[in-house]
Amino acid sequence: MKVFKLAHFLVKEIMSKKNHKFQNQQSKQIKNPSPKEVVHSAANKAGTADKPISAATKWMGITVIVLAGFFAYSPTLNNDYTNWDDNSYVAQMYALEKLNWEGVKERFHEYHMGNYHPLTMLSLSVDYNLSEMRKASDPDSPRPYEPDPFLFHLNNLMLHLAITFVVFWWVWLLFSAPVFASTVGKYRFEATLIVAALFALHPMHVESVAWVSERKDVLYTLFFVSSLYFYTSYALNGGWWKYGTAIFLFLLSLLSKGQAVSLAPTVVLIDWVASRKLISLKVILEKIPFFGLSLIFGIVAIKAQQSGNAIADIADYYWPERIVFAAYGTFQYIVKQVVPTGLAPLYPYPFKSGELPLAWWLYLLPVLALLYGTWIAFKKNMGVFLGIMFFLVNIFLLLQLLPVGSAVMADRYSYIPSIGLYIVAAMGYIYVSRKYRIIPSTFLKGAVVVYIAVLGGLTAVQSEVWKDSMTLWNHTLKLQPKAVVAWNNRGTTKEKFKDHLGAISDFDEAIKLKPDYTHAYYNRGTAYKEQAQLVATPQERDNLIKKALDDFDKALLFDPAFAEAYHNKGVTYDIAGDLQAAHKALSKAIELNPINPDPYINRGVVFGKLGKTDSSIMDFNKSLELKPNNASAYSNRGLAKDLSGDTLGSIADYSKAIEADADFQTAYSNRGIVRMKLKDWNGAINDFTKSVELKPEFADGYYLRASCYLELKNNAQACADFALAKQLGHPRADQQLALHCK
C-alpha cells in the first residue's frame, strides 16, 4: 500500500510539472484561467469531462423536440374559442381592425381584463386582421362575423415552440457555467435535451398554449427566457450589448404580462451561477434597471388587477390560511409535474375562511422538506439547488399569498417555474447514470424517452379538453364540482345555444355555491328574459320577466356600477311594455358606460316606440359613431327614417346593414317593405326572396312577395306564395287565396 501511494505521488508530481511546462510554452503563465478551463479542470477531477457535441447533433436534437411538440399540440389547431375570456379578448379587437396609430397608442394607455399587457393586445390584433372572418355561431352576437380561431391557436403554438427552442440554448449555455462542471460534465447534452423536451411536451403547459386568452403567457415567456439567455451569456462571457439586449427583452416581457417581474431576482440567481461577486458595486448597479422596471410594472399590475376586480376571494382568508394554501399549491405544482393527472382549468378554494381542516396544515411538511432539501443541495449539488431556487423564485408571487383571482392554483402559473423542476429532473438523470452504473445506459435513456412520450400523449389528450366551451366546462365540473366559474360559464354556453332552462339550472348551482355571485345573477336574469319570449301563456311570460328583473336587481345590489345589468334590465322592461322604465334603465347603462354602443341602439328602439323619432335617430347615430359598420344600428336607423318619411334614407341604411352583414334577414325584409312603398316591385321581390332563403319559416316574407307578384300581374306565382304563407300560419293568407286564386 505504501509503495502504491508513493508511486501515485510521483506520477502526480511528474504530470504536474509536465502540465506546468506545457502551459509555459503555450502562453507563459496563466494567472486567471478562463471559465472553460475551470470547467474542464473541474470536470477532469470529477471524471465527468464534457464530450464534444457537434453543432449538427445539437440542431438535430432541438429539431426533434420541436417537431414532437408540434404534433402533441396539433389538436389545438382544430379548437374553437371558449367563453372564458376569449369572447372579451377577441371581441375587443374590432377597435383595432385597421391597426392605426391612434389605436396602437390606446393599447398602451389602457387596462384590459385586470391586466396591463399592450403587446399582448397588439399581438391579438394582428391575428384579428390576418384571420379570415367566419359567421358567428351566435346569431345575437354584437359582431355578426368573427375571426377564424385557427391563426390565434397556430400563433400560440408557434410561440410555445419558439420558447422551447430558446430554453434549449439557454440551458445549454447555463450548463457551461463552472458550478456545473462537476455535476453535469459529459451529460450536458443529454441534460439539456431532457429540460427542453419536458418543457415542450408537459401537459401542464396546455392551458398556456391552447387557451387563446393566454397569449400573454406564451408571449411574455418568450421574451423572458430570451432575456435570460442574453443575461447568462453576459454574466459568463461579458459583452455590454448582451446586457442591454437582456434589459430590452425584459421590458418587452413586462409589456406582455406583469408576471415577468420575477426575472429581476432570477438574474441574481444567474450571477451566483456565473460565480460573480454579488456584493460588488458593478453587479449591484447592473441590477438597478431590472429591479426598477419590476417595481414600476409591479405597481401597474396591482392597479390593473384592482381595476378589473381580479383581487378577490382570497382577500377574505386570514394570513395563516393563505400560508397553508401557498404550501398546498407548492406541493401540487411539484406532484403534478411528476404525475400530471386531474388537470383542470380551475382549482377553486376548497373551504371558506375559518373552516380549514387541521389536516391541511400537514401540507407545510413537504414544503419544509423542500426547503431542507434546498439547503442540502446548496452544499452538495449546485444544479439541484439552482433548479429548486429557479422554481421558488418564479412561483412565489403566484402562490396566492398576495390575493389575485379566485383559484388556489392554476396550471398556467407553472409555465416558467417548471423549467427549474426540469433542471432538477435532469440532475436526477445524471445522478442515476453515475450512481447506479449497473443500470444499462440504453435502458435508462429508453425509460426517459418513454416517460416523455407518455407526457406528449397526455398533452394531445389535454389539448382536446379546450376544443370548445362545453367540452371545457364539462371536463372542469367532472374534476372540480365546486368550481363556481365553471357552472356560470357552462350556463352561458347553454344560453348561447338557446338552452335557456339548462342555463338557468347551471346558474342556480353557481349561486348556491356563491350567493353573492354578481355575474351568475346577471346571466340567470338574461336567461329568464330570453325564455320569457318563448313561453306560451302570458302568465308564464310575466312570471319569467319578474324573475329576470329580480335577478338584475340582485346583481346591481352587489355591484351598483354594473352597466350591463342596467342594459338588460332596460331591454326586459321593453319586452314587458314598460317603456318609461326601459328608458330610465337604458339611460343609466349609458351613464355608467358611455362608450358601449349597444345600449344606444336599444334606447333608440324605445324612443321609436314612444314616437320620438328624432331622439331615436340620434341614439343610432351615436352607436354608429362608437362602432362603425354596426349592422343592427343601421337597420334600426333605417326603420326610424322610414317612420319619419325618409324612404330613400331608409333604403340606404338597410343597404349598409346588409353590406355589414350579408345574412341580415330582417334588413332584407324591411328594405323590401320600403321598396313596396316606392312601387319598386322587382326590387322588393328580390329582398323578400333573400329574406325567406335565410328564414324559410318566415310567413310574412311569402305573403309580401305574393303581394308584389300580384302587382306585376303574376297570379300563378302570387298564389303559390300565398299558399306557402297559409301553410306557415299567416292570418290573412286564406283571404287572399279566396280572392285571387279560385
Image: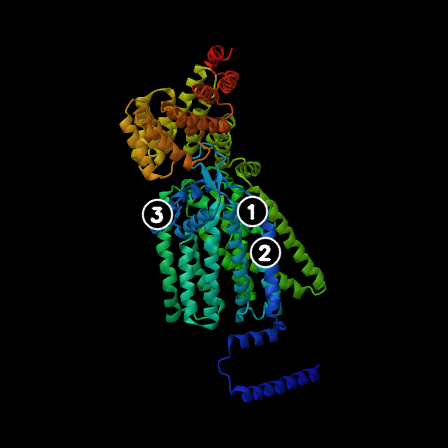
SS assignment at label 2: helix
Q: Would you identify the image quadrant in which residue 383 lies?
A: bottom right
Using the numbered discs, state the Cα–Cα distance from disc 2 to disc 1 in whole angstroms. Answer: 21 Å
Q: Would you identify the image quadrant in which residue 11 lies?
A: bottom right
Q: What is the three-letter code of the residue carrying label 1?
A: Leu
Q: Are marks 2 and 1 in contact (CB under 8 Å)?
A: no
Q: What is the three-letter code of the residue carrying label 3?
A: Glu
Query: Which residue is tagged 1?
Result: 77
Provide residue 47's location: percent of width, then percent of height.
63, 73
Observer-nearest of 724 and 36: 724
Along the polypeptide, which appears first: circle 1 or circle 3? Answer: 1
Q: Residue at x 28, y 32 (%)?
A: 618
Residue 597 visible in this rendered orientation of the protein: yes
Provide residue 138's location: percent of width, then percent of height.
48, 33
SS assignment at label 3: loop
Residue 364 visible in this rendered orientation of the protein: no
Q: Residue at x 48, y 71 (%)?
A: 236
Query: Which residue is tagged 2?
Result: 198
Query: Which residue is tagged 3?
Result: 110
- Looking at the image, residue 407 sits to the left or right of residue 637; the answer is right
Considering only vertical position in the picture, is 417 above or below 146?
A: below
Along the polypeptide, which appears first: circle 2 or circle 1? Answer: 1
Q: Are marks 1 and 3 in contact (CB under 8 Å)?
A: no
